[in-house]
Amino acid sequence: MVEQAGVYLDNAATTPVDPKVAAAMSRCLTLDGNFANPASHTHHWGLAATDAVEEARDEVAAITGAAIEEVVFTSGATEANNLAILGVAQRHEPGHMISVATEHKAVLDPMLHLRKMGWRIELLPVGEDGRVDLQQLQDSICDDTKLISVMHVNNEIGVVQDVAAIGAIARARSVLFHVDAAQSVGKLALDMHAQQIDLLSICAHKFHGPKGVGALCVRRRPPLRIGAILFGGGHERGLRSGTLPTHQLVALGEACKIARASMSTEMPRTAAMRDALWSELQSIPGILLNGSLQHRVAGNLNICVEGVEGESLVTALQRIGVSSGSACTSASLEPSHVLRALGRKPEQAQASLRISFGRFNVEADVAVAAQDIRQAVQRLRDIAPQVASS
Amino acid sequence: MAHSEHVLERFRHPKYVQNSESLCVGRAGSKLAGSLIELHIAVEHDVLQARFRAYGCPATIASADFLAEQLDGSTLHAARPDRHDIIRALQLGPARQHCAALAIEAMDKALEALPST
């Protein structure tokens, strides 16, 4: 892989589909496979597709701790987040919602949409380590707080929030609790009932499933009623209309199955690669780690590199695929909202790299990444004006 | 983020990076704003020597390298390139044209700083 195509280290953006998942998916496309509409109960093709979809639902339930009837299939985590937030809003008079400044736009944007409709949206700050202050969260709950939405693992910095503690706070005050678990499913243990989570979003493509499929797990005991945002057929108990994509759902189920079986060995292996790279990079002057190392998902490393511009750094890294928090698309620079929330200065946030390991990375990838980052940083610093920070 | 091959080639292999201290300097932009170009110019027998240093995106670095190449070896009173020359030569898209303007600003300041003009 290294010699031919470089090293892919952007698994937090998306992951390559596991070949076993791809094989399961491809068996659901053609006449000799499970291609049929799971809503067709008048023939054996349809009934076989129903069985396949329900097996996938079992797998999603097993990896999230949900009951089978709590799983609502969606097109991914963005739709699941929208369904959770807008669906709760539909069942209540406008009131108060709490989230966090470092959330994904798929949570922030529906919340800001609700603000235009009269909701009070409160975005809590995070500490330098990227974590929410639990006391501050507790203190921010009002009599009319309807929902708290906190992501389990941050997509940029990989920082893990204590969702069980937040769940306990929310439940004690009878406030609904939504968790965007797109970056944690398949990587960290989830049990929505033990963690007192009412609504849980996941997607397949962050853990070696395909893009375009995910789920929202909606608590049923006691029943939690949310409104739908898509209409046209009443699928998924009326919460998500649209023909169920058998091939996508079978792939999601297979991805869950593989992740659940391999999590206990795979996560320490991935964390070891991340730690080895961080150990190498620390010897380069002017490198800062963004967010807590202790409370961090296994594969994620996010660093600021002083004295180097982010897009140039990423462009110089020809052999490794990583992502940067900035892009020079206009004269004014927009650093990542996550890094700003950590208190990083704009000139620091300009050169940030997110390096994320996944199932198909190997130990040798660490040395390639370390060498290339070191060389690129040195070269760009050699070209840069020798002035302090003007 | 897509850059033309012209930009990428100059970004990867810039030929006119400044490495001596005896030149007049024109500076435009700032690291805080995301791009900073220094154009370093010296004159000997009416002929310019031009070099650059730059902090910024690949188009910023490529613009500075291209401009230094155009100026280097030209006579003091020759016509100067403008930003359109850089935009055309490097095939800069609309979102990158400020990089060319920044290089021209640095050139103008460097030429103003020359003692003989």
Image (tube, coloured by chain):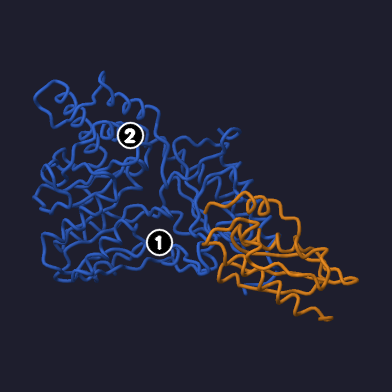
Q: Secondary structure at mark 1?
A: loop
Quadrant housing residue B72: bottom right
| Figure check: A152 above or below A58 | below
State which chain disc 1 sits on. A
Callout 2, which amino acid? Answer: Ala
**Residue corresponding to mark 2:** A255
Q: Colour of chain B?
A: orange
Tell me the subunit letter for badge 2.
A
Q: Is residue A121 left or right of residue B34?
A: left
Q: Residues within 10 Å of mark 1 (few under 14, many from 20)?
A: many
Where is A38 relative to B103, above or below? above
Q: Nearer the viewer, mark 1 or mark 2?
A: 2
Q: Is residue B115 left or right of residue A346?
A: right
Residue A250 falls in image quadrant: top left
**Contact between labelled residues 2 and 1, with CB atoms less than 8 Å apart:** no
* Label 2: few (<14), some (14–19) or many (≥20) C-alpha neighbours in 10 Å: many
Chain A image colour: blue
* Residue in view at x 20 percent, y 31 percent: A53
The residue at 54%/39% (across/down) is A7
Which residue extends farthest right? B45
Query: Which one is earlier in the sequence, the residue at label 1 or at label 2?
Result: 1
Instruction: List x then y, in percent, for residue A160.
Output: 36, 54
Q: Secondary structure at mark 2?
A: helix
Name the residue tied to disc 1. Answer: A130
Quadrant housing the N terminus of chain A: top right
Tell me how far mark 1 sits from mark 2, CA to CA: 29 Å
Name which quarter of the figure residue A40 lies in: top left
Tell me the residue at 61%/41% (across/down). A368
Residue A47 on image: x %, y % = 14, 25
